Amino acid sequence: IKNHYIDSFHINSENLKSFLSSHEISNSDLEIVLSTLSKLYNQKVDDILESCGSDWARLDSASSPLILFVQCIVELLSDHLDISSRCRFILNSFSKTLESWMIW
């Protein structure tokens, strides 16, 4: 299960990195965003796995990897990170676009 979440994170973060790069976001902003997302996401995955214990049926109520990824972006945006306003704007647009069609 953890591998599924981690593999999904790698795919989603690579897509986000490409998206941000295509909008000419600086390498320093990219590094901050991806590093922070990784920490937030891994912590949330650990929390999910801990809450499930040995009862994998409880995983049904956990967020999907993509929803978890978007939640981490929203959390990142609510913090006071040293990222440019342009990067914040693009991340916010990215997350809002995904949120609009995701089933929570």
Image: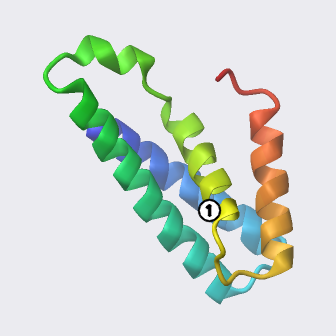
Question: What residue is drawn where x is 41% and y is 63%?
Answer: 39
Out of 77 and 68, give the one closest to the viewer. 77
Out of 3 and 75, give the one closest to the viewer. 75
Question: What residue is drawn where x is 39% and y is 40%?
Answer: 5
Q: Residues within 10 Å of mark 1 (few under 14, many from 20)?
A: some
Question: What residue is drawn where x is 36% and y is 53%?
Answer: 43
Up/down of 94 relative to 89, above or below: above
Measured from the top left, where is residue 4 in percent x and y?
35, 37
Q: Can you see residue 1?
A: no
Where residue 90 sits, quadrant-wise, is bottom right
Measured from the top left, where is residue 45 in percent x and y?
35, 43
Inspect the image, locate mark 1, and give the three-letter code of the amino acid beneath it.
Leu
Measured from the top left, where is residue 86 in percent x and y?
86, 75
Residue 3 is left or right of residue 68, and the answer is left
Report the coloring of the rendering. Answer: rainbow
Residue 28 is left or right of residue 2, and the answer is right
Total residue callouts: 1
Label 1, secondary structure: give it. helix
Q: Can you see residue 57?
A: yes
Residue 5 is left or right of residue 54, and the answer is right
Residue found at the very far left of the displayed protein: 54
Up/down of 93 relative to 21, above or below: above
Residue wearing tag 1: 76
Measured from the top left, where is residue 71 in percent x and y?
60, 45
Where residue 32 sits, quadrant-wise, is bottom right
Residue found at the very far top of the displayed protein: 57
Q: Quadrant of the N terminus?
A: top left
Residue 96 is left or right of residue 74, and the answer is right
Q: Quadrant of the C terminus?
A: top right
Question: What residue is drawn where x is 74% and y is 68%?
Answer: 20
